Every structure is written in structure tokens, then in C-alpha cells.
Image (cartoon, rainbow, N blue to C red):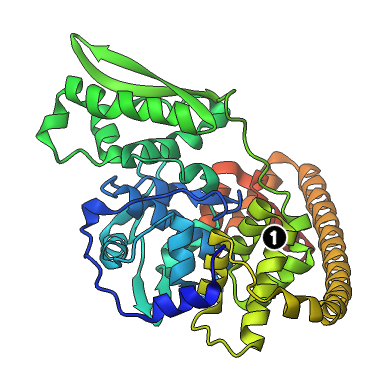
């Protein structure tokens, strides 16, 4: 059994660490680090020039997932540095590669409409993936340009990138190709890409070596297809188009992987309603990390480690980082070295647990009421949309044309105009705005 106090004493001693080079980074995949929550990732963020390392591409996805809910309301987002490393599966004390990866994200450009998804170019734009990034006092602060934040939060076309699947990839080319293929899962094919576009998406367009198809096929296409089919929830099959004796285009047929069915990514309400989850959050643990610990280890195990932290604090032990100590206690299964005192505190803890349980029940009831209120608002909105569409359909074709022209003039956001040009009144955002327009 591990002695927590002994470990704290060891950590207090200065150690000389051998500095690791970026090439020596060891990437691990602890299954407890992430929930299976998906990331909705806009085509602008996926279809970048592919010059991102595996760590940089994973970092881009984790930062976006952390910021997604507040993309339009906050200009800067924050994540604990230790939590960030855990979510990345990054097991190193050398922060230089992390700094280099953040620097790369601030210099790599995202260009929307890069693949010409719309038949007409509704809008073209370019932005760096991150506007800024700051590491300070154990925190990572970062931001996105307003134009890119709007694109990321209002995706016309997006891929749902599952964080649990992302952790399994070992090749930057495999993760890049997975992202580029997954958005076409429902239509079962990526469509034809010329080899220049494909090399650009894979980040090898600046290498003369890969301009020969035999090298591209042997070093990029075959290994990435093999890895995607082995570790992800889709299976892909490459097909090639020739012009004379040369391969000029490539596409990928996409199907579900029967070996790895899509994980259940939405059933986290039960975890969030537990007392242990609330205690972890109150301790300062990130929401996603708390969910992952409970899912992996169970409520009882996590509660025991929380009790251990409380006992250490009550005994006067100085703990520099509660989150760091708790993470180590869960990972290495710290045990209480004073079971007699633990038994003496049991009654008090039971009373506190009952208080927390009642508080959790109250909060859960409030969340249910909020959810019911949101559902009621959603039904009202759907009824308004249907009424507006029925009203529109009653007019003649000429009248409808005039109504659409007047309505289009009220669209003040680029993504709404793009949605309108592509789908007229069938787009979700446009339908709601049209209902407001009709009411006015």
C-alpha cells in the first residue's frame, strides 16, 4: 500500500530530471481520462493544411471541446494545465512540446470552403486556429478569432469527433484522414479528391517524395487505412481513378466498423447527478475528468479518495494541489494509514453525506425542471416554425419570391445567409428567424 505522506515528502525533494526531446514524448491512453462526449468540429477546422503533428491535432480538438459551450460568449477560455495533459494522454513533465504545439496552432490556418462543399462559393475565409495562447500559473488560457469562433459554433457541416476514439490514434495521418472521412459517414463516400488535395489534407504536399503515388500509397494511404479500421468506429476502403497509366484521384468508401460499434456518448446524466460527482467538482476537478473517473472507477472508489483528501487536510498535511493529489490518489490507489481515526470520523462523514445527498436531489430536481422548461420552449418554437411555413405556403409563387427577398434582407449573420442560400427555409437557424420575421 502507498503511504500518501511519504509520497508528499518525496515530492518535496528537489529532483534533477533529464530533459526530454519532443521525439521522446510518450503518449498514453488512460481510459479514465475522458468521457465519450463528442466534439462537433466544423469543416473549417478539419480541412486545414494538414501540417499538424499528432499531439497538435489532438490538442486542437481538446481545446475546442473545452471551449465549445462558451465560444460566442467568451473571448478567452481556460483549462487547468494538468487537466489538459491528462485529457491529451500526455505523460511527460517536459512542457516544451506543449508550448511548441500551442505555437503551431497559432500559426496554422483554417480555410473554410477548402473542399468546395457548396456548389457556389457562398463565403470564403481564413483564420489561424488559435488567436492566442498563454501558459501561466498552471493554467492554459487561449482564444479564437471572432470569425472562426462563429464558424466553429454554428457548423453548417461538421464531423462528430469522439474523444475516446481520438485517444487511440498513434499516427497524425490516421487521425487527419479519420476526421476528413467521418463527416461523410452518412453518404458512405468522401467523393473524389484529386491527389494534390489529398496530399494537402495529409500535410505531405511540400514533400517531393510523396508526389510519386507508390510512395504516397505505401507510406500514407495503406498504413492510415489499416489504423483507422483497427481502432475507430468506421471502416474505410480507398478507390482510385486513373488518367492513362497514372493515378489522379482518390476517394474513400465508408461504413460502420462492426468490431467497434459507436459508443453511447450521451448517457452522462446519471453520473452528473451523483453526490461523488458534485464533491469532485467542488474540489476543483474539471467536469469531464470527474465524469471519466466515476465511469472508470465507480462512485465508491472515488468517494474513498475524496475522504482520504479530507482526512489529510484535517490532520494538517499541506497539500499544494488538491487536484494533483487527488489524481495521484485515484491513479495509484492511496490508502488511509490511520484506519482508527477513519472509523471515528465515519459518523460525521455519514451526516455530511446525507446533507450532500439531499442537496444533490434538490439540484437534480431543479435540473429536471430546467430541462422540462427547455422542452416546452422547443415545442413552442417548432409550432411557431410550422405555422410560419404554413402561412408562407399559402401564397402564390410570386408572393413567395417577394417574401423571401424581404426576409433575406434581415439576415445579419454570414452563417445565416449561407444557410439560407443553401437550404432556403429548411435550415434550422433560418427557420427560427423566419418565424420571428412572420410574427413581426
Give the quarter of the figure containing the C terminus.
bottom right
Give the quarter of the figure containing the N terminus.
bottom right
Q: Is residue 284 visible?
A: yes
Mark 1 highlights which residue? Answer: 301
Relative to the observer, which residue lies in front, 321 or 292?
A: 321
Residue at the top extreme? 244
Q: Residue at x 74, y 77 (%)?
A: 340
Residue 3 in percent (x, y) is at 54, 71
Residue 91 in percent (x, y) is at 38, 58
Q: Residue at x 47, y 44 (%)?
A: 166
Relative to the observer, which residue lies in front, 310 or 190?
A: 310
Q: Is residue 217 left or right of residue 349?
A: left
Q: Is residue 397 left or right of residue 88?
A: right
Residue at the bottom extreme? 316
Q: Is residue 62 left or right of residue 207?
A: right
Relative to the observer, which residue lies in front, 230 or 406?
A: 230
Q: Is residue 430 visible?
A: no
In the picture, residue 236 is in which quadrant? Answer: top left
Residue 337 in percent (x, y) is at 63, 73
Relative to the observer, which residue lies in front, 223 or 69?
A: 223
The residue tagged with tag 1: helix, strand or loop? helix
> With respect to residue 311, does 402 lie above or below?
above
> With respect to residue 301, does 187 lie above or below?
above
Amino acid at each position: 500500500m502507498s503511504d500518501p505522506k511519504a509520497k508528499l515528502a518525496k515530492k518535496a525533494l528537489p529532483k534533477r530530471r533529464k530533459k526530454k526531446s519532443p521525439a521522446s514524448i510518450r503518449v498514453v491512453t488512460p481510459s479514465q481520462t475522458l468521457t465519450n462526449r463528442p466534439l462537433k468540429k466544423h469543416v473549417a477546422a478539419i480541412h486545414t493544411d494538414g501540417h499538424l503533428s499528432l499531439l497538435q491535432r489532438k490538442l486542437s480538438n481538446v481545446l475546442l471541446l473545452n471551449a465549445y459551450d462558451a465560444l460566442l460568449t467568451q473571448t478567452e477560455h481556460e483549462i487547468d494545465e494538468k487537466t489538459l495533459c491528462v485529457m491529451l494522454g500526455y505523460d511527460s513533465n517536459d512542457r516544451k512540446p506543449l508550448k511548441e504545439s500551442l505555437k503551431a496552432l497559432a500559426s496554422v490556418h483554417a480555410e473554410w470552403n477548402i473542399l468546395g462543399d457548396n456548389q457556389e462559393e457562398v463565403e470564403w475565409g481564413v483564420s489561424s486556429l488559435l488567436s492566442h495562447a498563454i501558459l501561466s500559473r498552471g493554467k492554459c488560457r487561449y482564444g479564437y478569432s471572432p470569425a472562426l469562433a462563429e464558424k466553429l459554433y454554428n457548423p453548417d457541416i461538421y464531423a462528430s469527433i469522439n474523444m475516446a476514439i481520438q485517444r487511440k490514434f498513434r499516427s497524425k495521418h490516421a487521425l487527419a484522414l479519420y476526421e476528413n472521412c467521418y463527416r461523410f459517414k452518412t453518404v458512405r463516400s468522401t467523393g473524389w479528391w484529386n491527389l494534390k488535395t489529398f496530399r494537402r489534407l495529409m500535410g505531405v504536399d511540400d514533400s517531393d517524395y510523396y508526389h510519386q503515388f507508390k510512395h504516397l500509397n505505401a507510406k500514407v494511404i495503406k498504413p492510415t487505412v489499416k489504423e483507422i479500421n483497427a481502432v475507430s468506429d468506421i471502416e474505410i476502403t480507398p478507390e482510385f481513378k486513373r488518367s492513362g497509366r497514372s493515378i489522379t484521384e482518390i476517394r474513400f468508401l465508408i461504413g460502420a466498423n462492426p468490431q467497434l460499434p459507436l459508443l453511447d456518448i450521451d448517457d452522462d446524466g446519471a453520473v452528473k447527478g451523483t453526490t461523488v460527482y458534485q464533491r469532485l467538482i467542488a474540489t476543483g476537478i474539471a467536469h469531464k475528468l470527474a465524469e471519466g473517473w466515476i465511469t472508470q472507477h465507480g462512485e465508491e472508489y472515488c468517494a474513498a479518495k475524496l475522504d482520504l483528501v479530507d482526512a489529510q487536510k484535517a490532520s494538517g498535511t499541506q497539500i499544494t494541489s488538491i487536484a494533483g493529489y487527488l489524481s495521484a490518489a485515484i491513479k495509484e490507489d492511496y490508502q488511509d494509514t490511520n484506519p482508527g481515526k477513519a472509523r471515528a470520523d465515519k459518523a460525521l462523514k455519514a451526516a455530511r453525506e446525507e446533507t450532500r445527498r439531499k442537496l444533490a436531489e434538490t439540484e437534480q430536481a431543479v435540473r429536471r425542471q430546467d430541462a422540462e422548461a427547455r422542452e416546452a420552449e422547443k415545442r413552442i418554437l417548432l409550432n411557431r416554425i410550422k405555422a410560419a411555413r404554413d402561412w408562407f405556403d399559402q401564397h402564390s409563387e410570386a408572393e413567395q419570391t417577394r417574401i423571401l427577398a424581404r426576409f433575406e434582407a434581415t439576415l445579419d449573420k454570414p452563417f445565416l445567409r449561407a444557410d439560407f442560400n443553401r437550404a432556403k427555409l429548411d435550415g434550422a437557424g433560418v427557420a427560427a428567424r423566419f418565424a420571428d420575421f412572420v410574427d413581426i
